[in-house]
């Protein structure tokens, strides 16, 4: 066995969870925050550079630990990326939080593995769909929608007590007419994606169970 150099070991305390790794491991992703920590500079220079980056908390000389007050669960995936070269996304963490943590550690979100990309993107996709819906409700095309849905001007100008009467046709068309607005098209496309696996499996079901049983 080769002689172990204690200086190669790095102890990271992230959110109270302690991790041990090697400087050579942290150097596998140049330009990231941890690669900076593992540089060949002396400790004082490293600390000075880290202190210039928002988010670094402290270095404990007694325990030889670098402490970061960040999400400990997400960091386990970050450190595993250095070790394996594959960046996975935890299923129990929302996309925006994971994105924020990646940004802190200096990792590009596009490095997320394909198997986790949909999980990572689903929150942002939902927000974009809601933005489309709100835009269609609030923009200047309200009058055009009113004419298309045959909403009388008197109904549109009534008070809050008739709010349901105003929006009822819009809501109905959202579900019944996939071409009534961009919001409806977004919902229709989403439903198509959800039911596609069911349609793909449908031909495997016998058309008439009676023929199989001799009825």
Image (cartoon, rainbow, N blue to C red):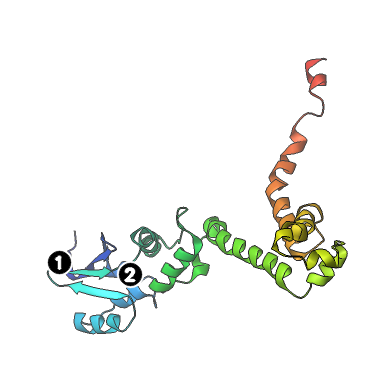
Would you call the spot at circle 1 few (<14 residues within 10 Å), some (14-19), or many (20 or more)? Answer: few
The quadrant of the picture occupied by the C terminus is top right
Decide which of 146, 68 is in the foreground and name it. Answer: 146
The residue tagged 2 is 26
Q: In the image, is 54 to the left or to the right of 115?
A: left
Residue 63, numbered circle? 1
Rendered residue at 69%/55% (across/down): 190
Rendered residue at 72%/67% (across/down): 137
Image location (x, y in percent) of residue 40: 26, 79
Decide which of 129, 6 is in the foreground and name it. Answer: 129
Choose top left, top right, bottom left or bottom right for residue 46: bottom left
Seen in the picture, residue 123 relative to 53 is either above or below; the reply is above
SS class of the residue under badge 2? helix
Image location (x, y in percent) of residue 169: 80, 57
Rendered residue at 83%/66% (across/down): 154
Residue 95, numbered circle? none
Decide which of 90, 160 is in the foreground and name it. Answer: 160
2 or 1: tag closer to the N-terminus: 2
Seen in the picture, residue 36 relative to 170 is either above or below; the reply is below
């Amino acid at each position: 066995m080769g002689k172990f150099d204690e200086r190669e070991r790095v102890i990271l305390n992230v959110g109270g969870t302690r991790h041990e790794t090697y400087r050579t491991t942290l150097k596998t992703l140049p330009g990231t925050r941890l690669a900076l920590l593992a540089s060949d500079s002396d400790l004082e220079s490293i600390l000075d550079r880290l202190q210039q980056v928002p988010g670094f908390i402290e270095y404990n000389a007694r325990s030889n630990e670098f402490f970061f007050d960040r999400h400990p669960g997400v960091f386990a995936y970050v450190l595993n990326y250095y070790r394996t070269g594959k960046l996975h996304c935890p299923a129990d963490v929302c996309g925006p939080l994971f994105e924020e943590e990646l940004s802190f550690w200096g990792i590009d979100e596009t490095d997320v593995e394909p198997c986790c990309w949909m999980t990572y993107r689903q929150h942002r996709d939902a927000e974009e769909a809601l933005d489309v819906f709100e835009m269609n409700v609030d923009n200047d095309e309200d009058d055009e929608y009113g004419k298309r849905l045959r909403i009388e001007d008197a109904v549109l100008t009534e008070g809050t007590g008739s709010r349901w009467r105003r929006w009822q046709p819009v809501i109905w068309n959202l579900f019944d007419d996939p071409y009534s607005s961009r919001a409806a098209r977004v919902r229709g496309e989403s439903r198509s994606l959800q039911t596609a696996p069911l349609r793909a499996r449908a031909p495997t079901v016998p058309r008439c169970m009676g023929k199989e049983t001799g009825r």
